[in-house]
Every structure is written in structure tokens, then in C-alpha cells.
Image (cartoon, helix red, strand yellow):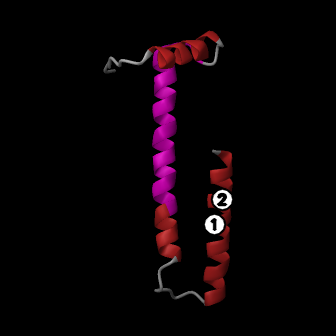
């Protein structure tokens, strides 16, 4: 495992320390790893959403118009529910 040193302004350092003191994380490293994982997940979801919307807005299809309507509505519902969770 590689190590990395970061510099934080005092208010951010105090915030990280408070998260650890509250027992949410066992160490600064654990907290940073969790933040990075969450950011990775967010980026992957954003890429997927963009690809889904691109596909939904595409004019090429062998499905009937009603099929696309159902698929589009289902995808938009999933996207909206994910946004609401953030």
C-alpha cells in the first residue's frame, strides 16, 4: 500500500479529527479512503447516467416507440431516486 501526505487548513483538520473522535472512522486514513471510494462511486454513476441519457435520446432503435417510453421512464426514475439520496 502506498502512503500519501496531505496538507489541510486547520478547520478541515479539525473536522476530520471530529469525525474520528465521534467513532465514525478509526483513523484519518480510513476517513480519506471512504471519501475517495464515495467519489469514485459518484463519478461512475454520473458516467452511467450520461450514457443512459445519451442512449435514451438516440434516434436509432429497433424497439417500438412505446417500448422506449417505458425504458426511458424507468431509467429517469432510477436517476431521480439516486439524486434524491445524495
How crowded pointer 1 is (Cα within 10 Å; few <14, some 14-19, many 20+) is rated as: some
Distance between mark 2 and mark 1 Cα atoms: 6 Å
Q: Nearer the viewer, residue 18 or 3?
A: 18
In the picture, the quarter occupied by the N terminus is top left
Main SS category, magenta section: helix
Find residue 18 and name its label.
Answer: none
List the residue tagged with mark 1. Answer: 76
Q: Is residue 19 above or below residue 71?
A: above
Residue at image point 41% right, 18% down: 8
On the image, the x and y values in percent for residue 74 come to 67, 69
The local secondary structure at tag 1 comes to helix
Residue at image point 52% right, 37% down: 38
Residues rendered magenta in the picture: 25-49
| Occupied quadrant, residue 80 | bottom right
List the residue tagged with mark 2. Answer: 80
Q: Is residue 3 left or right of residue 59?
A: left
On the image, the x and y values in percent for residue 64 come to 60, 90
Q: Are marks 2 and 1 in contact (CB under 8 Å)?
A: yes
Amino acid at each position: 500500500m502506498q502512503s500519501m501526505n496531505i496538507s489541510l487548513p486547520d478547520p478541515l483538520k479539525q473536522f476530520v479529527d471530529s469525525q474520528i473522535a465521534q467513532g465514525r472512522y478509526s483513523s484519518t486514513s480510513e476517513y480519506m479512503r471512504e471519501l475517495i471510494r464515495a467519489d469514485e462511486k459518484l463519478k461512475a454513476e454520473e458516467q452511467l447516467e450520461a450514457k443512459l441519457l445519451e442512449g435514451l435520446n438516440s434516434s436509432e432503435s429497433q424497439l417500438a416507440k412505446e417500448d422506449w417510453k417505458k425504458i426511458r421512464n424507468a431509467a429517469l426514475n432510477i436517476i431521480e431516486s439516486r439524486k434524491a439520496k445524495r
